[in-house]
Amino acid sequence: MSWPRIRALVLRYTFLYTRSIPRVTELFFWPIMDLLVWGYVTLYLQRLYAAQDTPPAGMGVITFLLGAMIFWDILYRAQQGTTLAFLEDIWARNLLNIFVAPIRVSEFIVATYLVSLLRIMVTVIVLIALAWFLYAFNLFALGFSLLPLFINLLFMGWALGMITTGLIMRWGQAAEALAWGVPFLIQPLAAVFYPVNVLPVWVQPVALAIPATHVFEGMRAVLRGEGLPGQYLFWAFALNFVYVVAAAGFFRFMYESARRRGLLAKLVTQ
Amino acid sequence: MSDAIVQVEHLRKEFNGTVAVADVSFTVRRGEIVGLLGANGAGKTTTIQVLLGLTTLTSGAVRVFGQDLERHRVEILQRCNFSSAYTALPSNLRVRENLRVFAALYQVRDYRPKMDALLQLFEIAHLKDKITGHLSSGESTRVNLCKALLSDPELLLLDEPTASLDPDIADKVRKILRRIQRERGITMIYTSHNMRDVEEVCDRVLFLHKGKVIAAGAPQEVIARFNQRSLEEVFIRVARSGDLVEAQ
């Protein structure tokens, strides 16, 4: 793997953001809108409970919504950043120039990972600052648990990103909507805003097979002050390992299939 | 053959049972400019795509710089470059930013003097700081050619490089390509529907029809063999009665 080539690709994708106000706006607009909506819903629910004579135990649990929202955005941005880098080259009719350059598939993938990581860092820093400013919600209260949870969401987002990009490579721009839709396919099952035990019993094994489920369960445990149970981390890392390896295999398979069918050139001229 | 840069042997490519290239064999020697000609659907685009590693072959063998293309794709592409009228560089980057990215992708050291010299050569030095999307199609084509030459390729694949140029600029570009080929000894594979382009630029042409090479040689030889007055007339004859030509 050549780092200078990866750096060149990262440069290509980051140049975009220095020149395009809509792209920079897109980094912040939806996350901030989500934060405002979820934040004020949270405040409203807190006031409702506070007005009751006997507030339910664990009332602070409502702040889970804000943490979950920020964590969900990490996963979503990781997936989307990976896929959008590929789509940018289709839209620019530049994909052939990239794929006839001496680039290995692995270098292309790593470059899209790094671009998505940069996007996430920018978005999350703004969200954390706003959540603290508007709602006095401190994500850093998660302490050192924050890092492994963040890494696991990143891995899962990257795995989904590779799968999405593979599908677009195979089915072309007709599959473009997947770039925005794929994470929402797993959202109801990944126990993002509610614990797994809320789900029907027969759905729970499916939910537990998703790495993000263990991240969100872990996050809630930490916010409840229980620390981060090792089992959540173990399962998140183990499942992510399987997901990333499977997604890389899937991407490779789709890439070779696209080459066999002559689809890479068609992506540019569709 | 030690000076063979490209060796294609019995290349066959099918897409879901449809034959795009039936049986194509040819060799391109160092420093040659070879034109791939043929009507739409003749198989020249697929052949170019195979040579660029964008498409796998169904059967046959392709060796570039003496190496198997499928096994040494990245090493081979490091020594090649490509320009097409049908691709573009990212429109929201400045010309110099685009060239910087591709210089880095091809690991070109000290790219700035090379970039400046190429922009000067193609008479677009004044566009260096312009947004690529704001250029005319002729200017974009010339920036694409700068990108293709920036890495000092040994093999250059050009797909309709003068398609969007006015006659004056097209003439200049043809002369520049010829000059670069003479000075640097670059091998070029050239596709164009402009037969005047091909006659002026190419040392040798390969006429493809229904995925097979049905005529090959220097442009004047091919014109004489078909008893026509120009390559354009040969093209029309092959396009309209290629099956008969193939049978002869």
Image (cartoon, rainbow, N blue to C red):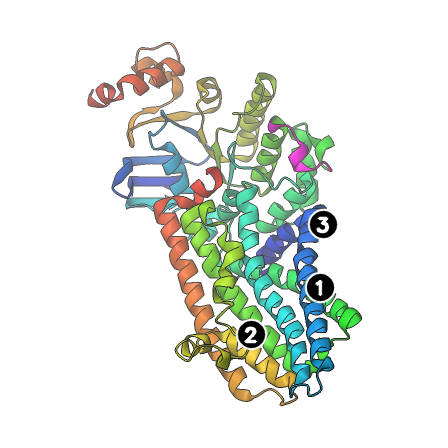
**Three-letter code, disc 2:** Asn
**Three-letter code, disc 1:** Leu
Q: Is residue B54 visible?
A: no
Q: Pick whichever, B43 or B120, lies toward us.
A: B43
Give the magenta-colored segment's residue range: B129-137
Residue A195 is one of the magenta-drawn residues: no
Foreground disc of the pair 3, 1: 1
According to the image, label 3 marks what residue?
A: A18
Q: Pick whichever, B232 or B224, lies toward us.
A: B232
Distance CA(mark 3)–CA(mark 1): 27 Å
Q: Quadrant of residue B138?
A: top right
Callouts 3 and 1 on one subunit: yes
According to the image, label 1 marks what residue?
A: A36
Name the residue at the left extreme: B247
Badge 2 or badge 3: first in the primary sequence: 3
Q: Chain of mark 2?
A: A
Please name the residue shown 55% across and 46% down the image.
A89
Q: Is residue B171 above or below residue B46?
A: above
Using the image, tell me which numbered label, if any, was put on residue A152. Answer: 2
